[in-house]
């Protein structure tokens, strides 16, 4: 059946459109009549009095010459520009603070005239849903779609070239192009995906991958001594699993097939003090201990390995030292002290056969050593064991042990022990698989083989079924025939049933109908086209929904709803949205939308200066990303208000992040919800991920942070600095000036002030967070985290700043609505989208800012449901470049 | 509440065992030994480093053969090219005029990237109506590409995903791709060494029997025929930019078809190259660039392609250089405000880049080709689309050209163009030496002068 010309379809479309067109009355475009009178007296005079001094044809501050706007008609002609001007004036950002304030009455008169004129123009403008360019699947969408279609989860698209991004997101139809390399990858991936689905993993040659900690852990590096860098850790109070200890190594690894793998860890230069019991090296997969080995004596290059069976797919692999402070000599005061005798230490030399010398005193005499604990490293002590005198004779400094001294808290001056906190993992190798299971996954079999091979016509049933899912709509007989022709080729040469299916799937996966989301204009005489706009068909709408929310194809139920025309009714559409919001596939929305909106993806390649920020290690990187994902996911799952993004007083932390945030009660590597009431952190701006992503690798920047907030929370990005801005005259700034004094110099410069008066105060409010999101009181000098927003509101510190942002909740709601709409549509917003956004923001308010109400509003909006038609024959010119080249070749 | 889950992937050092891979051989792979009598083919590489350079440490003193290296803030950057001084032509006075604002405001990094190889002013857009021009490497590829297995190769050494708006309202495509196959079609580089290796040297699973391989190849051809038909069926129903996208797809399909046809004609010789197959992106940047350059050299040596574009990093790159003791981001350093300590760091980064590239030059010089070396028959363009990145200057670009092309380039000199000259004039000359006829590239006004000694 050709669904496109189905009479039922057309009728449904017309009825549904009529039913819903009440609020979107389609008018014929009207030539805008001349604007309301009064521009000269209300606006032009205001500009002349207050703005022309900086924005004229010679001094075009902010690249803006206001004298060019001489008539009211300019508002219609330069709408975007005027929107911005209006916004700046209303927000009090312009004129800048150092200029005289405009007269209130004149200001009101100007803004009212502009608002009135814009509203008038909006009413006149024909509704325009815009036209989204056909989008090819991006890498994430390709991976998800083949996974949902065929149960193949090996992420083939990770090898594709990177997707370009536009308007902040990498699902923009206009910039997602196809190169030759891309095409080659599609062909190769189609083959591998189809074969993996039908036969099982394709390349399972044993491989060895080797991982090392990121640029850290050099012998003698003080950062190896994590009691120095992680002051909350103590020998009696630490993560006993070892997982979230700074000396664990964490990696994410994709195991190509279920099979046996060797996990091999090599500890580095650490010591286990002599007299200690062997150190356990624990191997973890997805946070569970899967094997242990014990290293005795010197740890250096003491490689240990375990062999474990691992299931196919991506796993979190870690190596750490469980209970690493147990089995130490009793003098350390940690739990379960060593039962081994402590060998005598010898002055200046190496210890006996038990390893290296253990205990050193700088003073003479056999004094007892106080145990660690009590008011120990973390200040949360559980009480230490009683001190004990070292067994053995004359203690002496052992220069061989460490250059950095270590003494337990509470110890008398001069007491020194061998460092217990310097061991780490030098490398982790993962080798395998051996004895791999080469068979298709149950999920693949279930998804593909919906009938038995010996049932006549089963091949065609399978192909038609998969094609409907892959093309995300009913397929025609002819389309199935085309795919079956590939299967027939295999059959003709005597290949198996499975091989025939493989070929049909392979063909499906390189078809433009799979790789692109094409929305087809109805034919020229189709009556669903009104004023050049038309409603998407049910299946196109289903795809828009599923790629918006799941970054993947519609599932059976959504396609079924499309079959029945349910998506054309608000109730039916909303029911699907609610269902989809509860699906675990919303994690992909968090990853793709959240990762780009909040720029958390940047963290993947962010490399903070590890000498300056020793706390930033791989585990922290993983933890901070996880925190934000869980936080975002929770807002979706519990359908909380979007204002939580601004000022939530809770977040999700594991022990490590908890310590980082000063939440001392969180224990263990599992994430859980925690209250932030006792901290200076609120909402996203308190999360280490955002604070790190909005910093330079080696310092914070009030400008970057301010810009981040303006762009991503208020959607009011500052314009780029005008070209050829002179540098600040450093000579005029005192050498010992505080950061604030330097930035003030910035803001006292008229050209810079317009934007920096917006960016800098926000950045200053977050200055207590360092470049990796850790709290600090000083940055050389004591930090002054107070500020004044352009509208005069003042704050002190991040909590008050977030309170002010919360007061601007509507601005944030609009920002999020705009960002999410860009993502949902795969195109940038245009002035004609304003009514639709206004409607979303109003609906969001009615919906008490609940997350679901925003998603529902977007799904219900005109730009999401409709598309502007273009004549098929016109405007379809060949790519000028291609043509040019062909001509050149001739010559 | 407790949530226990997997963590996201990390970027970390991932190094595999040394794997030896059999390399499909082409007739053309034996150019030096067999085809010495014929005129050697000319190769071109376009190698881009972002964020300008410390010009005081780049530009030599004097012109002609007796130029001297000078520097102010560190060692002369060109010092690292001294072993190849006789193979190098330093060009001063070239400009990328279309990188300038020309009324479009900020965004110099995006424009520098977008215009460097195209000579066209990039349309100021985040996506809609994206437009620049076809790049010189792609013009070259269209001209000579059919003679090799790959018409061109594009490599990038920045594997981070782009986030947000890349520069002042410009689409990330302008900084991500220097190569453009058409005015609206970016040709992004491959950034994963493993993927590059697989594509260049291990595209087919040689563990399969020849019969199976032949079957798979036939399958691909048949499937491409189907795709071709699908596109043609769709095309008349599409309008506007949709049609352009489908056109892009059709072009890619045809190119793959051509490649498969060419591959069928190839003879295969299985060898074990002295090269460790990369398993991912090395953590250390130096190792990353070296791996990419090594593969590029191998591709030239095996005559897999004659046109390569290599991007050290995206324009405006924030990369840190901890491995040479520079924890600051490259871009912030490049806005040095003329502070000597920052200029010195910038020189160190520029020198590090140059050092890595000189190894590549050395490899080509060590490879015999026809009556000379591979380097003799190459044109390796090395440079940046900004000179002083602090002020976003798009003129007096730091440019060096290695190799003698068709033999007519007189290397070993420093040339200064007194009149600012478009980069694209140099491109026209380079195309000419590859025997590719083009009337113009972007803003070119003619061929560049003084490449050969008069």
Image (spheres, coloured by chain):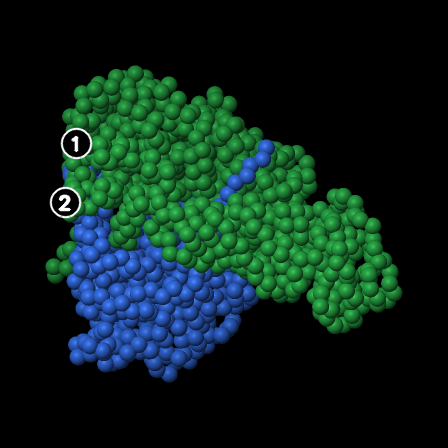
Chain colours: A green, B blue
Compared across the picture, whether B41 is left or right of A762 comes to left
| Quarter-of-image position of residue B442 | bottom left
Residue visible at 22% across and 41% down in the picture: A497
Compared across the picture, whether B61 is left or right of B215 comes to right
Determine the secondary structure under disc 1: helix
Give the mark nearest the N terminus, 2 or 1. 1
Q: Is A31 situated above or below B148?
A: above
Toward the left, the furthest residue is A890
The N terminus of chain A - image quarter: top left
Instruction: Give the image location of residue A147, x and y in percent.
Output: 36, 40
The C terminus of chain A - image quarter: bottom left
Which is in the foreground here, disc 2 or disc 1? 2
Question: For mark 2, does the 10 Å Cα neighbourhood hold few (<14), some (14 to 19), or many (20 or more) residues?
Answer: few
Counting the numbered discs, the total is 2
Give the chain of mark 2: A
The numbered dot on residue A731 is: none
Toward the bottom, the furthest residue is B66
Q: Name the foreground residue: B142 vs A233.
A: A233
Instruction: Give the image location of residue A152, x and y in percent.
Output: 36, 42
Residue visible at 48% across and 22% down in the picture: A847
Residue located beneath label 2 in the image: A492
Compared across the picture, whether B35 is left or right of B379 comes to left
User: Is residue A193 in view from this perspective?
Assistant: no
Residue visible at 62% across and 56% down in the picture: A294
Instruction: Give the image location of residue B43, x and y in percent.
Output: 26, 69
Q: Name the foreground residue: A715 vs B42.
A: B42
Residue located beneath label 1 in the image: A477
Q: Is A134 situated above or below B382?
A: above
Give the Cα distance between marks 2 and 1: 21 Å
Q: Is A38 situated above or below A502?
A: above
């Amino acid at each position: 059946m050709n669904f496109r010309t189905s009479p039922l379809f057309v009728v449904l479309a017309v009825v549904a459109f009529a039913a819903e067109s009440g609020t979107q009355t389609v008018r014929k475009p009207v030539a805008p009549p001349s604007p309301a009178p009064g521009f000269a007296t209300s606006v032009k005079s205001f500009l002349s009095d207050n703005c022309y001094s900086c924005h004229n044809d010679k001094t075009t501050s902010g690249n803006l010459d206001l004298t060019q706007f001489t008539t009211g008609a300019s508002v219609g002609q330069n709408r975007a520009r005027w929107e911005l001007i209006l916004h700046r004036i209303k927000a009090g950002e312009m004129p800048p603070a150092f200029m005289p304030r405009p007269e209130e009455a004149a200001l009101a008169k100007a803004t009212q005239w502009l608002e009135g004129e814009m509203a008038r123009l909006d009413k006149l403008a024909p509704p325009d849903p815009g036209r989204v360019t056909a989008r090819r699947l991006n890498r994430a969408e390709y991976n998800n779609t083949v996974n949902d279609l065929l149960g193949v989860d090996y992420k083939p698209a990770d090898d594709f070239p990177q997707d370009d991004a536009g308007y902040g997101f990498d699902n923009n139809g206009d910039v997602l192009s196809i190169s030759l390399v891309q095409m080659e990858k599609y062909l190769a991936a189609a083959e591998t995906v189809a074969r993996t689905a039908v036969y099982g993993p394709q390349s399972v040659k044993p491989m060895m991958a080797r991982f090392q900690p990121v640029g850290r852990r050099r012998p003698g590096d003080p950062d190896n001594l994590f009691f120095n860098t992680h002051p909350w850790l103590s020998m009696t109070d630490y993560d006993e699993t070892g997982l979230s200890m700074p000396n664990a190594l964490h990696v994410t690894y994709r195991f190509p097939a279920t099979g046996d793998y060797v996990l091999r860890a090599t500890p580095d230069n650490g010591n286990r003090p002599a007299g200690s019991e062997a150190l356990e090296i624990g191997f973890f997969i997805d946070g569970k201990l899967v094997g242990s080995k014990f290293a005795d004596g010197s740890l250096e290059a003491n490689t240990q390995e375990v062999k474990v069976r691992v299931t196919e797919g991506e796993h979190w692999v870690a190596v750490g030292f469980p209970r690493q402070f147990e089995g130490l000599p009793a003098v350390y005061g940690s739990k379960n002290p060593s039962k081994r005798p402590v060998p005598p230490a010898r002055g200046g030399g190496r210890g006996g056969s038990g390893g290296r010398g253990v205990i050193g005193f700088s003073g003479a005499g056999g004094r007892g050593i106080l145990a660690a604990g009590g008011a120990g490293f973390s200040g949360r002590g559980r009480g230490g064991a009683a001190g004990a005198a070292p067994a053995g004779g004359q203690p002496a400094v052992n220069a061989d042990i460490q250059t950095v001294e270590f003494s337990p808290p509470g110890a008398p001056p001069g007491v020194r022990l061998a460092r217990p906190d310097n061991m780490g993992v030098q490398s982790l190798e993962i080798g395998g698989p051996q004895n791999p299971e080469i068979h298709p996954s149950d999920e693949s079999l279930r998804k593909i083989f919906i009938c038995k091979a010996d049932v006549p016509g089963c091949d065609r049933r399978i192909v038609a079924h998969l094609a409907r899912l892959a093309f995300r709509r009913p397929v025609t007989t002819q389309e199935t025939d085309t795919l079956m022709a590939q299967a027939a080729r295999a059959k003709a040469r005597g290949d198996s049933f499975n091989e025939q299916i493989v070929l049909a799937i392979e063909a499906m996966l390189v078809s433009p109908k799979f790789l692109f989301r094409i929305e087809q204009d109805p034919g020229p005489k189709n009556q669903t086209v009104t004023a050049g706009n038309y409603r998407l068909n049910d299946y196109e709408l289903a795809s828009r929904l599923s790629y918006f929310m799941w970054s993947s194809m519609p599932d059976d139920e959504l396609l079924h709803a499309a079959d029945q025309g349910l998506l054309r009714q608000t109730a039916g559409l909303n029911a699907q949205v609610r269902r989809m919001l509860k699906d675990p596939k919303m994690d992909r929305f968090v990853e793709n939308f959240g990762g780009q909106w909040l720029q958390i993806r940047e963290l993947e390649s962010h490399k903070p200066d590890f000498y300056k920020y020793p706390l930033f290690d791989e585990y922290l990187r993983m933890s901070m990303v996880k925190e934000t994902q869980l936080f975002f996911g929770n807002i979706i799952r519990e359908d909380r208000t979007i204002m939580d993004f601004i000022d939530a007083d809770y977040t999700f932390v594991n022990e490590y992040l908890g310590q980082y945030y000063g939440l001392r009660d969180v224990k263990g590597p599992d994430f859980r919800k925690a209250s932030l009431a006792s901290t200076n952190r609120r909402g996203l701006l308190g999360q280490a991920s955002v604070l790190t992503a909005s910093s330079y690798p080696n310092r914070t920047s009030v400008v970057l942070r301010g810009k981040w907030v303006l762009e991503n929370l208020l959607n009011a990005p500052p314009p780029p600095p005008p070209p050829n801005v002179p540098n600040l005259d450093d000579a005029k700034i005192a050498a010992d000036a505080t950061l604030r004094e330097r930035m003030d110099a910035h803001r006292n410069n008229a050209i810079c002030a317009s934007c920096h008066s917006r960016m800098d105060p926000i950045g200053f409010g977050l200055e207590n967070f360092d470049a990796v999101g850790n709290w600090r009181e000083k940055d050389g000098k004591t930090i002054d985290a107070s500020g004044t927003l352009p509208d005069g509101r003042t704050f002190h510190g991040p909590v008050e700043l977030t309170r002010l942002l919360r007061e601007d909740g509507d601005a944030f709601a609009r920002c999020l609505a705009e960002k999410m709409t860009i993502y949902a549509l795969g195109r940038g917003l245009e002035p004609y989208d304003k009514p639709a956004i206004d409607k979303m923001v109003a609906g969001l308010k009615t919906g008490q800012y609940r997350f679901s109400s925003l998603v529902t509003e977007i799904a219900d909006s005109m730009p999401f449901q409709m598309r502007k038609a273009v004549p098929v024959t016109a405007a379809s010119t060949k790519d000028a470049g291609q043509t040019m080249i062909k001509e050149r070749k001739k010559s | 509440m407790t949530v226990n889950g997997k963590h996201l992937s990390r970027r970390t050092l991932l190094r595999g065992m040394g794997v030896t891979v059999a390399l499909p051989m082409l007739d053309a792979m034996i150019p030096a030994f067999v085809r010495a009598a014929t005129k050697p083919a000319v190769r071109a590489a376009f190698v881009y480093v972002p964020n300008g350079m410390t010009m005081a440490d780049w530009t030599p003193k004097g012109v002609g053969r007796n130029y001297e290296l000078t520097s102010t803030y560190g060692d002369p950057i060109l010092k690292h090219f001294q072993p190849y001084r006789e193979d190098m032509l330093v060009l001063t006075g070239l400009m990328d005029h279309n990188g300038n604002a020309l009324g479009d405001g900020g965004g110099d990094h995006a424009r520098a990237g977008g215009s460097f190889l195209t000579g066209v002013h990039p349309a100021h857009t985040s996506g809609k109506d994206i437009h620049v021009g076809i790049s010189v490497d792609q013009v070259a590829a269209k001209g000579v590409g059919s003679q090799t297995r790959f018409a061109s190769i594009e490599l990038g050494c920045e594997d981070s995903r782009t986030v947000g708006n890349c520069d002042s309202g410009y689409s990330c495509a302008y900084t991500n791709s220097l190569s453009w196959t058409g005015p609206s079609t970016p040709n992004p580089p491959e950034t994963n060494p493993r993927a590059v290796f697989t594509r260049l040297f291990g595209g087919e699973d040689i563990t399969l029997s020849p019969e199976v391989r032949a079957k798979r190849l036939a399958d691909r051809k048949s499937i491409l025929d189907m795709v071709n038909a699908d596109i043609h069926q769709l095309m008349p129903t599409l309008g506007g930019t949709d049609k352009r996208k489908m056109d892009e797809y059709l072009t890619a399909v045809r190119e793959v078809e051509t490649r498969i046809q060419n591959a069928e004609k190839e003879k295969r010789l299985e060898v074990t190259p002295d090269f460790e197959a990369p398993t991912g992106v090395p953590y250390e940047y130096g190792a990353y660039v070296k791996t990419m350059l090594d593969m590029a050299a191998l591709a030239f040596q095996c005559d897999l392609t004659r046109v390569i574009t290599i991007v050290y990093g995206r324009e405006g790159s924030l990369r840190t250089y901890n491995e040479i003791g520079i924890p600051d981001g490259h871009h912030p350093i490049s806005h040095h405000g003329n502070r000597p300590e920052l200029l010195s760091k910038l020189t160190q980064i520029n020198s590090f880049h140059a050092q890595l590239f000189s190894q590549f030059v050395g490899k080509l010089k060590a490879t015999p080709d026809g009556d000379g070396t591979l380097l003799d028959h190459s044109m390796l363009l090395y440079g940046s689309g900004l000179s002083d990145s602090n002020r976003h200057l798009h003129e007096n670009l730091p440019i060096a050209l290695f190799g003698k092309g068709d033999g007519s380039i007189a290397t070993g000199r420093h040339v200064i163009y007194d009149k600012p000259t478009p980069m694209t004039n140099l491109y026209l000359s380079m195309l000419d030496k590859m025997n590719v006829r083009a009337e113009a590239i972007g803003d070119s006004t003619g061929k560049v002068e003084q490449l050969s000694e008069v």
